[in-house]
Amino acid sequence: MSVGVAVLGSTGSIGRSTLQVLARQRERFRVVAITGHSNKDLLAQQAQEWKPAFVGLVNGGSREPGAGSRNGTSCLVEAATHPDVQIVVNGIVGAAGLEATLAALRAGKRVALANKETLVMAGALVAEAARQGGGEIVPVDSEHSAVLQCVAGRRPTELARLILTASGGPFRTWEPERVSKATVAEALKHPTWTMGKKITVDSATLVNKALEVIEAQFLFDVSYERIDVVIHPQSVIHGFAEFVDGSVLAQVGFPTMELPILYALTYPDRVPDQGIRRFDPVAAGTLTFEALDPHRFPAYVVGREAARVGGTAPARFNAANEVAVQLFLEEQITFGRIAEIIERVLAEGSGEKEEGTSLEEVLAADADARRLAREAACS
């Protein structure tokens, strides 16, 4: 019998890639629920093709939805907890994905998680929800998927260190002063990945790597001091796992999100998929690595500090970044101000005093950080 899947954010880049994978695996999976943010035309096309039992549009306006459909943010939780769903692919960008993840885990679902903000904001709460409900998280991020593939079946005591790779984005070779004045168009020219605007800007600031470091702590029970990041412009090696005896394993493949999505759907098994581009070391060519320059990527440094502080500091870091990135995309602030705003919010917030042990506390910290970020942008 096929496995029921809910795709949250089906109109986004992760969601579209997920449906491409599922189209090649129809004998194993069926699409039970899909949700989109505001692209109602694409969502309607997907609904017509897949005929899911549930369709949700978060920003659906006042129009009355049809049968089996919902408007508003509550549709995310409804889709994630649908009784015919066994796997929830969470491809939502930002803090909006948190409550659906918690609900799915409490309902005993597997969450194929591309929404890194969920663990960044509330890693301890997510772990508790999985324990209570019997759900599980399998990462979709290419870096975390790579690490999972390297450490699967290993004892935690064997693991010494994780190394996540970063392409370096479009500003890898730019001088810091030039980076600070980068335009929106320049920030969105990612050299190796095709992603949504927010995630692409996060890759340009390397905020995405700071978020991934925080996330990896919860996924693999490794302290942030044992997680390193290196610049790897070719984006062919996605992550390394170093073991206590000095051995290092790496996961290798041409840049595509379809492989980690497939692995998250079938984990711990592997299934054939002829749509995935096969690796060719000759075609890959020379692979290079560089140290991360903190002067070029100050927002990454702030994110590492948030990881050290813990509590609600990561949630504040994420919220401040979401506000700053949106303001940058709207051309209300310069690129250089993204890191500045995040740093000011972390300095003004009370992350060191807040444990983040309840959803209410996490959401309050998130709201406070957003307010502070907007105030900082105006000053």
Image (spheres, grey):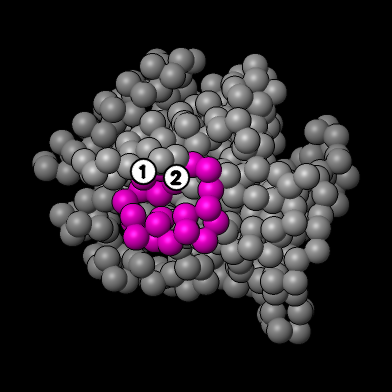
Mark 1 and mark 2 in contact? Answer it, CB < 8 Å.
yes
In this view, 223 is above or below 327: above
SS category of the residue bearing label 1: loop
In this view, the residue in front, 45 or 91, is 45
Q: For the C terminus, which image quadrant?
A: top left
Query: Who's the residue at 49% across and 64% down the image?
Result: 168
Q: Position of residue 82 (x, y in %)?
A: 56, 33
Residue 75 image-quadrant placement? top left
Residue 291 image-quadrant placement? bottom right
Mark 1 and mark 2 lie on one chain; the one further toward the N terminus is 2
SS category of the residue bearing label 2: strand
Q: Position of residue 185 (x, y in %)?
A: 29, 71
Q: Which residue is disc 1 drawn over?
A: 66
Amino acid at circle 2: Val
Q: Which residue is disc 2 drawn over?
A: 55
Amino acid at circle 1: Gly
Q: Is residue 353 visible?
A: yes
In this view, the residue in front, 22 or 125, is 22
Q: Position of residue 45 (x, y in %)?
A: 43, 61
Q: Which residues are magenta?
A: 35-58
For the residues labelled 1 and 2, the Cα–Cα distance comes to 9 Å
Residue 363 image-quadrant placement? top left
Q: Is residue 150 visible?
A: no
Label annotation for residue 170: none
